[in-house]
Image (tube, rainbow, N blue to C red):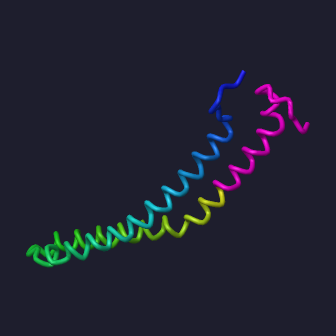
Amino acid sequence: MKKNGFINQTVGGVVTLIVGTAVATLALIFTGVLGGQTYNLAQADISAINDSTIKGYVEDSVKSAFKAQSQVGNYLPLIVLAIVITLIMALILSMTALGNMAGGGRSAL
């Protein structure tokens, strides 16, 4: 017997994946924006470093961080595609063999 407010596990998983995708997208956007603003605020402090070796290391690490963030951002469409395929497969499987094992009785097989 199902109680009011009962959510099928597949529906909960789909909602979780959609929310997770949205959060990941926003995190990448805000990381780039806030990272750029932080660098603008700290650029004067970096320029004030007297030791050229340390200054070079700091500048190289900042460049490396922005390059890594850019590469992850470039793969975001592929990540979203993988999540969409996962959602579709989860829905199909929930209506077929897995739905029957859970006692759904609406199996297409």
Quadrant (top left, top right, bottom left, bottom right) of the N terminus: top right
Quadrant (top left, top right, bottom left, bottom right) of the C terminus: top right
> Which residue is at 16% across, 74% downward?
46
Horizontal side of residue 52 vs 71, given as left or right: left
> Which residue is at 67% across, 41% downward?
11
Q: Is residue 15 above or below residue 22?
A: above
- Residue 22 is situated, as x and y percent measured from the top left of the image, at 53, 57
* Residue sitting nearer the eye, 58 or 43: 43
> Mostly what secondary structure, the magenta segment?
helix
Q: Is residue 91 above or below residue 37?
A: above
* Residue sitting nearer the eye, 95 or 7: 7
* Residue sitting nearer the eye, 12 or 37: 12
Horizontal side of residue 98 vs 66, given as left or right: right
Horizontal side of residue 47 vs 84, given as left or right: left
* Residue sitting nearer the eye, 85 or 63: 85
Answer with the quarter of the image where residue 65 lies.
Answer: bottom left
> Which residue is at 87% across, 35% downward?
107
User: Which residue reaches farthest front?
Assistant: 4
User: Which residue reaches farthest top?
Assistant: 1
> Which residue is at 39% across, 69% downward?
32
User: Which residue reaches farthest right?
Assistant: 109
Q: Is residue 49 above or below residue 92?
A: below
Answer with the quarter of the image where residue 50 lies.
Answer: bottom left
Q: Is residue 98 magenta?
A: yes
Horizontal side of residue 8 vs 94, given as left or right: left
Answer with the quarter of the image where residue 100 lies.
Answer: top right
- Residue 45 is situated, as x and y percent measured from the top left of the image, at 14, 73
- Residue 25 is situated, as x and y percent measured from the top left of the image, at 50, 62
The residue segment tinted magenta is 83-109
- Residue 34 is situated, as x and y percent measured from the top left of the image, at 33, 68
